[in-house]
Image (cartoon, rainbow, N blue to C red):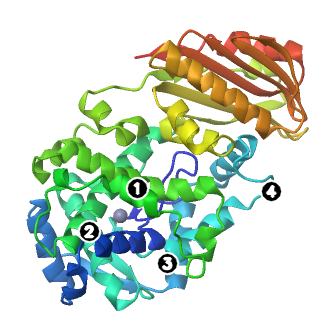
Amino acid sequence: MRLDYATTSRIRRLAKAALAGSLALLLMAAAVGSARQVSVLKAKNADEILHVVSRLRGLDVKRAVKSGSKSHDEIEQSVIADLNENTTPAEFAATAKTLTKLGLIDKGFALREYVIKLLREQVAGFYDTKTQTFYLASWIPFAEQEPVIAHELTHALQDQHFDLRRFEKWPKGDSDAELAVHALIEGEATVLMFEYTVGGGKPIDLSRIGSLTDLLLSQSDAGDATRFPVMAGAPAVLRENLQFPYVYGVGFVQGVIKEKSWKSLDSCYEDLPQSTEQIIHPDRYLARDKPIKIEIPDLGPALGSRWKRADYDVNGEFGYTVLLGQFVEKQRAKRAAAGWGGDRYALYEDAQAGRLLLTQFTSWDTVKDAEEFFEAYKERTAKRYHVAAPSAESGHKITIDTEEGAVLIELRGQDVVAIEGAENRDQLSKLAALVWQASKKP
Ligand SMILES: [Zn+2]
């Protein structure tokens, strides 16, 4: 696993985590904005940096860490090798289909190619758990190297103490939980990088500074389109997923540590965060608000033999923030996705006819949370499709005929079901009856 390539709930397994170049710069900018010590940092070698990071974090250096440098071309080769190893072409295609059906990328968008270009541009460095070596991108200007090295060496320390390789082959079907673990790993390395840079090697009281997540969010629009054109031109879903582990990971780490020491973070590697909800709201992690596990029954028999299940996964609170935010006002999307209790989606494809059918079962903390999501999802759906005149609506159920088939959105108590792309109303009600039989395990 190479940390510092993005792993995401939807773009999951595209590659494993990357210290996004523009994000590293954002953090640098933030650091310079809140302290002036950056300019007085003296150039240190990697071994010195490792010992400073080890002292700040309170984790011993168990063994020296090898280092190397990689050009854009070499990073691209690493990214491609990683993709080939971790994501089959079928999985890539499935992700692209789900993103297309959700209206997050255009039909025919070359997802794999774009991700390679994006990571080639964005990867500032990475730590390779296989060879236990960290690499720095050769194009990073001298002044920006030290924070990136501090970040990558934090990954080396994490690996020496908590074994990062165990997160490599994540079981399929719950990428929301996988994204949460990556946010822990990246959040920790990014906060330490911040502490290293701003504190000039001295500890910072994280409870006395403002939210680092808010700091990053407030600056994340200020991306440098000249320096990072691929990132600037990326569909929002790619950009936001790439940034999630860093932007929300820092807030999670800050929220778990509070006024305590870094030591309090160690237990997170035993008792892993289980959802992006827990990352976005660290108090939910501390209160052990566990996600509800949902399974949708096999819809194959009801659909017929031409249809195959192409994708089966969890969107999570963050996934819903992004997919609603594509069509409705951002703050509203955020509020509607909060109160998430659990979800599951299943995407089916009739390859012969070129049809996609998406079913979602979502469960919310309260009836009010479910109603809020129901209303936001209705608005999103009306904007997602061109022909969207609702033809049957009650307060809790809406049926729409669209240019991509029949759509149903239905609220029952704390649960909301959405089905998009049925061939006709008859099929839609048969499918709804089945999806409502989904199992829920607390
Ligand atoms: Zn990292």
Q: Disc 3 to disc 2, how far (Cα)?
A: 22 Å
Which is closer to the viewer, label 4 or label 3?
4
Q: Disc 1 to disc 2, how far (Cα)?
A: 13 Å
In the image, is 117 to the left or to the right of 218? Answer: right
Checking the image for residue 247, the label placed there is 1
Give whichever of discs 3 and 1 has the lower sequence position.
3
Q: In this view, does 150 lie above or below 380?
A: below
Instruction: Label 4, secondary structure: give it.
Output: loop
Q: Can residue 165 be seen from the camera position used here?
A: no
Amino acid type shown at disc 4: Gly
Q: Disc 3 to disc 1, how far (Cα)?
A: 23 Å
Residue at numbered disc 3: 75
Amino acid type shown at disc 2: Met
Is 176 or 223 nearer to us in this picture?
223
Residue 171, image x and y in percent? 45, 40
Q: Residues within 10 Å of mark 2 (few under 14, many from 20)?
A: many
Checking the image for residue 108, the label placed there is 4
Checking the image for residue 193, the label placed there is 2
Give whichever of discs 4 and 3 has the lower sequence position.
3
Residue 411, image x and y in percent? 64, 14
Give whichever of discs 1 and 4 has the lower sequence position.
4
Q: Disc 2 to disc 4, how far (Cα)?
A: 39 Å
Q: How crowded is mark 3: few (under 14 residues within 10 Å), some or many (20 or more)?
A: many
Give whichever of discs 2 and 4 has the lower sequence position.
4
Amino acid type shown at disc 1: Val
Q: Is residue 76 above or below residue 216?
A: below
Instruction: Label 2, secondary structure: give it.
Output: helix
